[in-house]
Image (tube, rainbow, N blue to C red):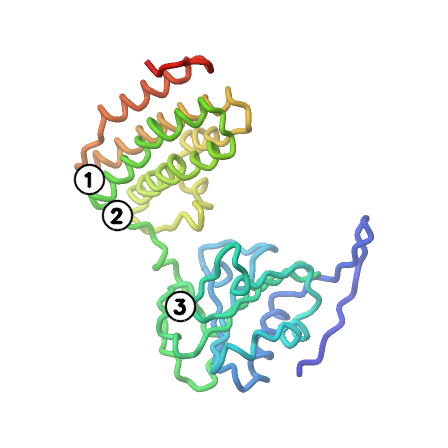
Amino acid sequence: MLKKKIWRPFVSKEGVIYVKMRTEQEMLDLIITFAKRDHRIRGVLMNGSRVNPNIKKDIFQDYDIVYLVTSVKPFKDENYILSHFGEVMLMEKPEDKIFPPPIGDGRYTYLMQFMDGNRIDMHFIHISKVDELIKDSLTKVLLDKDHNIPDIPPPSEQSYLIKKPTEKLYNDCCNSFIWGLGSHIPKTIWRQELPLLMRLIDIVLREPLIQMLEWHIGIKTDYKCSIGKGGRHLKKFLEPEIWNDFEKTYTDANYDNIWNSLFIFHDLFKKTAEHVGQVYGFHFPEEECKRALEFLKHVKELPQDAKSIF
C-alpha cells in the first residue's frame, strides 16, 4: 500500500476545502510508484496533451494514463484505487454506466478530478493489447517492468495530422452540408423546435464546415498539423477574417440571430469548399447549393400559419 500524503488545505469563499495543487513531477511519481508496488501492473503508458510537443502546457492538462495489467478485474475496486491518489472532488466510471454507453472493450476506467485541481483519466487495460495501444503516436512509455513493450518513436501528432480529401470524401461533405441547409434546417427552424434545431446545426452544418476548414488548413500547412479534438486549434491556423466568420456561426436562442448565423454558415462553407475544390480539381455542386439557399430564404419569409410551402 502507498503511504497517503497529506496536502496543505485552503478554504474557498464558499467554505469548500481544497488542497495545494501537486506538481507534475509529484503526480508522475505517484502514478509510477503505484504501478511499481503492484505486481499485477506490468507497464504504464501516458498519452494525450501532456506528451504532445506542440501543445503549450497549462494548469488544466489531464494525466491520460494507461496501466497495462495481467487482469483488469481487481482494479474495479474503487477503494483500492482512491486510497492511493488523494481526495477526489468528482469521479466518473464510464464502463459502469449505461448513459452514455460504455466502450465495452474490456478496459476499466476512472476519470478523477481531485481536490487539488489535478485530473487523471486512468485506464486499466490487459497487457495483451499493448501493440494496439502504442499505435497512437501520442504515447510515451513511463514504465516497462518486463521490457516487452516494443520501442516507439518520441511522441508526435503523426496519428492526428490532417489527411488530404479524396473526391468521394469531398463530395460527401458537400452533400451533407447542402442537404442539411436545404432540408433539415428549414423545416426545424420554421417549426421553432429549438432543441432539435441546435442539435442539427451542430451535426449537419458545423461538422461538415469544420471538416472543410480542416482541409483548407491542411492545404496551407502542407498537412503537417492537427486542429485537435473538436477543432480546438482552429483559431490558431485560420486567417483572422475566416475565424471571425466562424465565431458568428455560434449564436443564442434568438431566432433572428439563428437565421443570420445560417446565412453565415452558407457563405463560409461555400467559399471554403470552392477553394478546396479548386486545389484538387473537385467539382463544387454550385446548383444544388444555390437551390438550398433559395429554399432557406423562402422558408424564412413563410408565415407561421402557412398551409402550403409554395
User: Could you give the CA–CA distance between mark 3 and mark 1, rounded to whole angstroms?
Assistant: 33 Å
How crowded is the residue under tag 3: few (<14 C-alpha within 10 Å), some, or many (20+)?
Answer: few
Label 2 – label 1 distance at C-alpha = 10 Å
Residue indicated by mark 3: 154
**Above or below for 189 versus 85:** above
- Total numbered labels: 3
Residue sitting at x 79%, y 52%: 12
Q: Which residue is mark 1?
A: 280
Type of the residue with mark 3: Pro
Picture residue at 25% right of the left edge, 44% below the top: 169
What residue sits 40% from the left and 37% below the top?
206
Q: Earlier in the sequence, mark 2 or mark 3?
A: 3
Report x, y in % for residue 82: 66, 71
**Residue 259 lies in quadrant:** top left
Crowd rating for badge 1 (residues with CA inside 10 Å; few <14, some 14–19, many 20+): some
234 up-or-down from 296: above or below = below
Give the residue type at disc 2.
Answer: Lys
Q: Which residue is mark 2?
A: 164
At numbered mark 1, what does the secondary structure look like: helix, strand or loop? Answer: helix
**Nearer the N terminus, badge 2 or badge 1?**
2
Label 2–label 1 contact, CB within 8 A:
yes
